Image: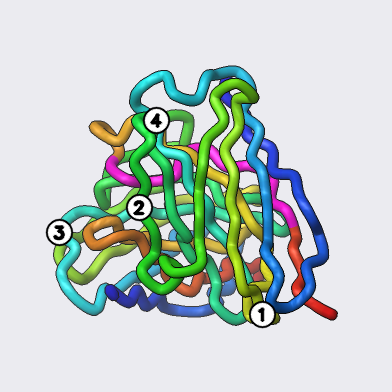
Amino acid sequence: QVQLQESGSALVRPSQTLSLTCSVSGGSIGSGHFYWSWIRQSPGKGLEWMGYIHDSGSTYFNPTLQSRITISVDTSKNHFSLKLNSVTAADTAVYYCASTSSVVVTGMTFDLWGRGSQVTVSS
Amino acid sequence: DIQMIQSPSTLSASVGDRVTITCRASQSVGSLLAWYQQKPGKAPNLLIYKASSLQNGVPSRFSGSGSGTDFTLTISGLQPDDFATYYCQQYHTYYTFGQGTKLEIK
């Protein structure tokens, strides 16, 4: 079965770029029908969907983050990545990667999640 | 964006109880509403989609209802494993979550 695992920098300086990768095992990115999302969770904002990339390569972002976020896929490494630039302390959160495997059945819900990666923005 | 408000924020109950959690949307989301369970230090887990459809593998004591702006999650016959935080999520207009309801042992 498909599993997701986040990796990346745990500490990011203010104004710098946050970078995380989600490695996919047990399945292949680009197989045709999956949506691959990033979702973050902080005590102040709760759960916040950040954006997704579809197997087709199309992307869709939370309007509040659209100017700062990039999501990309590397099919050769079977992972997808998040970049969030110009970070501030408000971007401190646990970052999850998640997938939607059966949008026709369940709609845009998140049926598989990684374990999460704590990212702290601090100087 | 669509705001999702859950009530109560905290709910105390005992094993065997029947509990209900409410989620209200700031505008209609039709039936495009999901419920998740999250335990400390873990990622959320999808329980219900399309307001009332049970995700594969989720026990039948969980049920969901509602449409438009008002939704409920009901757990019938609480088990020790059910004490966790529950979130609703709408997927009508991009995707937003409620603030969570913590279900704790009385």
Q: Mostly what secondary structure, the magenta segment? A: loop
Q: Mark 3 falls on what kind of element?
A: loop
Which residues make up the magenta segment? A107-117
Mark 1: amino acid: Thr
Q: Is residue B1 magenta?
A: no
Q: How far apart are marks 2 and 1 (CA)?
A: 22 Å
Q: Mark 1 falls on what kind of element?
A: loop
Query: Residue A33: x percent and y percent?
Result: 34, 26
Q: Mark 4 falls on what kind of element?
A: loop
Q: Residues within 10 Å of mark 4 (few under 14, many from 20)?
A: some
Which label's residue is closer to the chain start, 2 or 4? 4
Is residue B68 shown left or right of residue B36? left
Q: Mark 2 points at which residue?
A: A60
Q: Distance between the residues labelled 1 and 3?
A: 36 Å
Q: Name the residue under label 1.
A: A88
Q: Mark 4 lies on which chain?
A: A
Q: Residue at x 26, y 73 (%)?
A: B25
Q: Residues within 10 Å of mark 2 (few under 14, many from 20)?
A: some
Q: Distance between the residues labelled 2 and 3?
A: 21 Å
Q: Are marks 2 and 1 on the same chain?
A: yes
Residue A55, label in figure:
4
Query: Residue A104: x percent and y percent?
Result: 24, 32
Q: Mark 3 points at which residue?
A: B30
Placement of the N terminus of chain A among the 4 image quadrants: top right
Mark 3: amino acid: Gly
